[in-house]
Image (cartoon, helix red, strand yellow):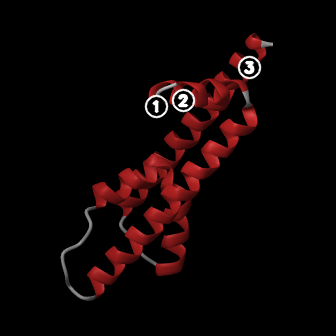
Amino acid sequence: MDFFDQIMDVFSLMQSDQRLQMLGVVVVYASMSIITLVMYGLDKTAARNRKPRISERTLLFCGLACGWPGAVLAQKLFRHKTIKPSFRLAFVSTVIFNCFALAVLFYWSSISLNLLR
């Protein structure tokens, strides 16, 4: 069995086991949240020291890529990116989109699991 066959076995197992799907989602959200939290911290430090900053687009993309819980925590911890209305609107939009995509993922995975049974 080669590497790609093993990967396909893992994907087929994840499709059939909802607990593994949930674990995968939790791992992705936790990992991206930590990365996003660190990025907000680095940007806040750069802002204080008048150094080159991390772009708002990058911070928003990290939040959209499942890191928004870390971004929310970072905004509270560092009091960073909490005032600018255009950023706040874009950030809230990414959170809403991400939650909608997560709901769709769980809805479709529950339908596919019911079809397999």
Q: Which residue is mark 1?
A: 3
Are the two marked residues, 1 and 2, in contact with CB atoms closer than 8 angstroms? yes
Residue at 53% of width from left, 63% of height from top? 70
Direction from residue 102 to residue 49 in the image, left or right:
left
Q: Amino acid at mark 2?
A: Gln
Direction from residue 48 to residue 62 in the image, left or right:
right
Q: Position of residue 115 (x, y in %)?
A: 74, 11
Label 2: which secondary element = helix
**Camera-side residue: 76 or 105?**
105
Q: Amino acid at mark 1?
A: Phe
Earlier in the chain: of badge 3 and badge 1, it is: 1
Q: Residues within 10 Å of mark 3 (few under 14, many from 20)?
A: few
Label 3: which secondary element = helix
**Residue 83 visible somewhere in the drawing:** no
Residue 6 is tagged as: 2
Q: Position of residue 14 (x, y in %)?
A: 65, 30
Q: Amino acid at mark 3?
A: Leu
Q: CA distance from mark 1 to mark 2?
A: 5 Å
Q: Residues within 10 Å of mark 2 (few under 14, many from 20)?
A: few
